[in-house]
Amino acid sequence: MPHFLAYKTNFCLPLVCNDYEISYKIQSLKYPELSLLCVRYQQRVFFIQERKRKDKNDILIKALKITKPAPVGILKEALKILSRHSDTFCHNLENTKPKQEVEIPYFINPEDLHKLKMLDSTRSISLEIGFGSGRHILWLAKQNPQSLFIGLEVHTPSIEQVLRQIQILGLENLYILNFDARILLEILPSNILHRIYLHFPVPWNKAKHRRIMSKTFLAHALRVLHKDGILELRTDDKEYFTDTLESILSFPNAKFMVHKNISQEITSKYEARWQKQQKDIYDVNIISLHDEEQNIQDFSFTQDFDFMLPKALIQKILSNPLSQAKIDNLTQKRVYQGYFLHIYDVYQDLSRVIFLVSMGDFLLPLNRVIVLQNDNSVLYYPQSFIPNQGTIMAYIKFIEVLENL
């Protein structure tokens, strides 16, 4: 990660340079050696962390990971500005590569999920989960220019590779999203997708709770598919295959087709490897049977929850300094049935209080910076919360914890 080391910092805030504004610095109440610097670049806001290392008599300055911007060139330029106003003796802020500077319109950050609303919903929309090298989804997009495709992946090098291929091939119908498929399917509206591809997912046979495929995932997948839409699973793992069949058969109504060792028009990297090893490959096509009327014009999220705080509560928090006892109470990890809440750091100055929070479903935790300001507003970085059930329950507990201070 880009960073630099300095003996001391000499910058005065606010610091403005080109499109960057570093507006304020705020100190942690739990860890006094930590401070956050708020950076605005055009319409984006992210935080840089300053850590005073007493054992080494220096200062480490790097991104606060949960708000790290993409492309990484945005972060590097902000660090360069701060480095020029510090007694810097070590850094890795060499010239930014072109691919680190270019913002690609077909890449959708989690904080930009609203961009999905702008897709042409009159066109067929398909989703591939975990596209890996991208060979399959790139081929689909190239062969079907009249359709739209969304690719989900959490592996950054794979995302960068596919984004470069989108540019090289001149594709205009493929969008890439760095996001967890289980959350996305939970919040998407019904009847929106034509097809979902899940090819060669990690089996996790010794930790099945980590699998993408589950009864809950199946229920959401069949809901977001329109009638006769297909969830296509392709796997070389027989246990994953049989467990999936068992999950399907637990539904009161089910329609599916099973194939074994049937070649497809395009072969993925993993499939080519398994074929060389003469491994069996299993296909399960699960068909959506629901009869709900299609409503693909409204690409809005399924749950409407207001992630806000009462103004009186904000005023109470801001007007009362947080004692060490309150900080210790706040930062306890709270575990409930099916979800958790962990406020793991607190920052405060005369104008604001900042909470660093991890919360939500155990398998799908969300990390956020929550800023309470003296104008009674609440800001969330890198985005507001995704309204899935675990997050909503955890946020309600967050309000209760603040009210009981």
Image (spheres, rainbow, N blue to C red):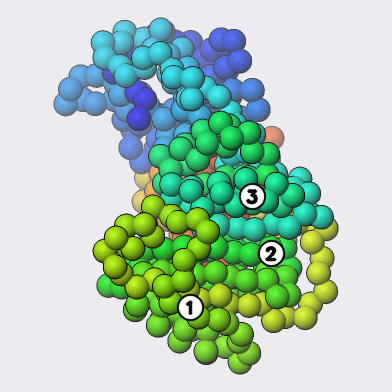
Q: How packed is label 3: few (under 14 Cα within 10 Å), some, or many (20 or more)?
A: few
The one of 352 and 9 positioned closer to us in this rendering: 9
- In the picture, the disc for residue 114 is none
Q: Residue at x 58, y 32 (%)?
A: 167
The one of 150 and 311 positioned closer to us in this rendering: 150
The residue type indicated by label 2 comes to: His
Q: Position of residue 2 (x, y in %)?
A: 36, 25
The residue type indicated by label 1 comes to: His
Query: Which sits earlier in the primary sequence, circle 3 or circle 1?
Result: 3
The residue carrying mark 3 is 143
Classify mark 3: helix, strand or loop: helix
Q: Residue at x 21, y 25 (%)?
A: 54
Q: How packed is label 1: few (under 14 Cα within 10 Å), some, or many (20 or more)?
A: few
Q: Residue at x 59, y 35 (%)?
A: 169
The residue carrying mark 2 is 194
Compared across the picture, whether 247 is left or right of 89 comes to right
Q: Relative to residue 249, is residue 10 depicted above or below?
A: above
Q: Relative to residue 335, is residue 34 depicted above or below?
A: above
Q: Relative to residue 103, is residue 405 depicted above or below?
A: below
Q: How many marks?
A: 3
Query: Which sits earlier in the primary sequence, circle 1 or circle 2?
Result: 2
The residue carrying mark 1 is 259
Q: Is residue 161 visible?
A: yes
Judge depth for marks 2 and 3 and give the one in front: 3
Judge depth for marks 1 and 2 and give the one in front: 1
Spatial CA distance of label 2 from label 3 is 16 Å
Compared across the picture, whether 334 is left or right of 303 comes to left
Of the 4 image quadrants, the one containing the N terminus is top left
Q: Position of residue 196 (x, y in %)?
A: 59, 64
The residue type indicated by label 3 comes to: Gln
Q: Residue at x 60, y 42 (%)?
A: 108
